[in-house]
């Protein structure tokens, strides 16, 4: 196969065309055969439920090339299971874990030349997508669906990689409601976040910060990433019905516990921010993005966390440990990594 000559070091988090994607159609009540496609296009009925009523879900995971040249994919089953929970919430058929797993492995293998080398610190982002393709004019679930997975090589989500960032609380818009879809990975949540995200960017912040929609008292999420704070040897992360159950956060909680930290999942009042020794945003894209401060501009308060502007030692250790497991530099005691055999 032709070798790709990318400037791997300078990849950003953007779409890059790769060779193949994999697809599976749901018709007449069952999933069909897995198909391989080299087209970036999908023909779709103009009355498809995904287009009008947002009946769609997506996922995000990564494949990494290790020092040994082997390819490792992180937490395939956890992503399959979250997609199944989003499918239940949106009345879409569940993609079985086994087929999900088979398709992820297949699409990664087919696009192996796009997996960045170990030294670059970049990775291959894997994007599963499930959409209602059947036509409806009334608000009803579709009777036909398409599940596809494409991949694209990516660099760091935030420019500058592992460095602290300031965030800004946007009180004007909510991303999701307490009993809404915030716990699921549906496109509508991201549509709802675009204005807040743009406001943050316009003010010079890389990302917006959400409080709970009902009381605006508790921490919810850091844009498209979960929040965690560190204090008194404890990893504290929000318990909320309007945030995505982040697989990175779940992994960090396990790693933190094994490093000897206590782990607390509970409501976190915004005023508590100043008591944290460190804090971070976490997700597949960024792994950990340490937080410098959070500005609540409407109330004129700035909660400074990293007083010296630098990532703290616990964030660094968590980041290094999780990355080492993902790249295969450390053993994986949790069974999170699928190593592709040559
Ligand atoms: N929160 C939101 C809203 C997200 O979109 C993401 C990204 O997937 C996360 C959190 C982090 O989740 P994960 O660690 O599973 O990537
Ligand atoms: C993440 O993977 O952490 C994300 O936030 C993905 C984003 C592009 C939706």
Image (cartoon, rainbow, N blue to C red):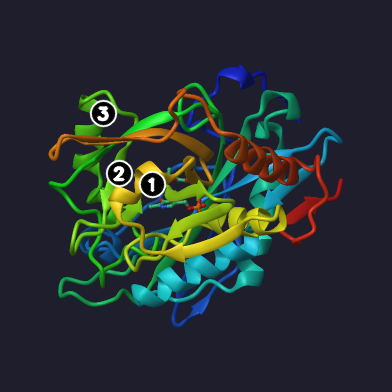
Q: Secondary structure at mark 1?
A: loop
Q: Earlier in the sequence, mark 3 or mark 1?
A: 3
Residue corresponding to mark 1? 224
Nearest the eye: 108 or 262: 262
Residue with the mark numbered 3: 201
Query: Label 2: how many residues lie within 10 Å, few (<14), some (14-19) or many (20+)?
Result: many
Lateral position of residue 193 relative to residue 152, left or right: left
What residue lies at 29% left-to-right and 49% top-to-bottom? 271
Left or right: 276 with respect to 216?
Answer: right
Residue shown at the point (67%, 18%) measured from the top left: 5
Badge nearest the viewer, 2 or 3: 2
Residue 232 drawn above or below residue 315: below
In the image, taking residue 333 as reference, residue 255 lies left or right, namely: left
Q: Which residue has dot 2 on it? A: 209
| Residue at 64% in and 44% down | 318
Crowd class of label 1 (few under 14; some 14 to 19; many from 20; radius 10 Å):
many
């Amino acid at each position: 196969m032709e070798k790709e000559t990318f400037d791997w070091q300078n990849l950003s988090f953007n779409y890059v065309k790769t060779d193949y994607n994999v697809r599976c159609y749901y018709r007449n009540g069952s999933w069909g055969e897995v198909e391989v496609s080299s087209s970036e296009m999908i023909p779709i009925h103009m009355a498809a439920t995904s287009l009008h009523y947002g009946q769609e879900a997506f996922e995000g995971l990564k494949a990494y090339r290790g020092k040994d040249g082997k390819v490792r994919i992180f937490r395939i089953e956890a992503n399959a299971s979250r997609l199944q929970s989003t499918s239940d919430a949106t009345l879409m058929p569940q993609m079985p874990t086994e087929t999900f797993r088979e398709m992820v492995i297949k699409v990664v293998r087919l696009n192996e030349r796009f997996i960045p080398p170990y030294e670059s610190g970049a990775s291959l982002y894997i994007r599963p997508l499930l959409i209602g393709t059947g036509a409806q004019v009334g608000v009803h679930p579709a009777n036909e669906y398409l599940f596809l997975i494409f991949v694209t090589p990516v660099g760091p989500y935030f420019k500058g990689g592992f460095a602290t960032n300031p965030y800004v609380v946007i009180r004007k818009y909510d991303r999701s409601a307490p009993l809404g879809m915030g716990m699921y990975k549906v496109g509508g949540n991201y549509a709802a976040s675009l204005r807040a995200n743009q406001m943050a960017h316009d003010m010079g912040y890389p990302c917006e910060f959400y409080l709970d929609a009902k009381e605006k008292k508790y921490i919810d999420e850091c844009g498209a990433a979960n929040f965690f704070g560190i204090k008194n040897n404890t990893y504290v992360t929000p318990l909320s019905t309007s945030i995505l159950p982040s697989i990175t956060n779940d992994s960090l909680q396990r790693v933190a516990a094994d490093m000897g930290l206590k782990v607390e999942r509970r409501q976190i009042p915004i005023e508590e921010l100043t008591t944290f020794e460190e804090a971070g945003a976490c997700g597949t894209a960024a792994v950990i993005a340490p937080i410098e401060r959070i500005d609540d501009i409407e109330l004129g308060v700035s909660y400074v966390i990293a007083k010296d502007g630098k990532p703290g030692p616990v964030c660094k250790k968590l980041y290094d440990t999780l990355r080492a497991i993902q790249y295969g530099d450390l053993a994986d005691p949790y069974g999170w990594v699928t190593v592709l055999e040559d």
